[in-house]
Amino acid sequence: MSQNIPPRYGFVNYAEIWNGRLAMIGILVGLSTELLTGQGILGQIGFG
């Protein structure tokens, strides 16, 4: 009994779509935090 389940890791469309979505969420969170605090990312973690 062989199942044709497509891989969900590596350079496949499924993984790349989620990678793009999570990157967009990360950028949105970073920009929102910068607008709320008035400091850039380096200032927020103590390097600026």
Image: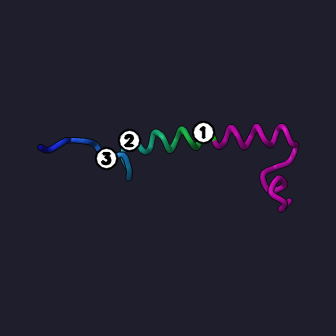
- The outermost residue toward the left is 1
Residue type pointed to by label 1? Met
Residue at image mark 1: 24
* Quarter-of-image position of residue 42: bottom right
Label ID, residue 15? none
Other-residue count near label 3 (Cα within 10 Å), few / some / many at <14 / 14–19 / ≥20: few
The image position of residue 31, as x and y in percent, is 74, 40
Residue found at x 84% / y 55%? 43
- Quadrant housing the N terminus: top left
- What element does badge 1 sit on? helix
Q: Are marks 2 and 1 in contact (CB under 8 Å)?
A: no
Residue found at x 44% / y 44%? 16
Residue span colored magenta: 26-48
Of label 2 and label 1, which has the lower sequence position? 2
- Within the magenta stretch, is there residue 24? no
Q: CA distance from mark 3 to mark 1?
A: 23 Å
Of label 3 and label 1, which has the lower sequence position? 3
- Within the magenta stretch, is there residue 40? yes
Other-residue count near label 1 (Cα within 10 Å), few / some / many at <14 / 14–19 / ≥20: few
Label ID, residue 13? 2
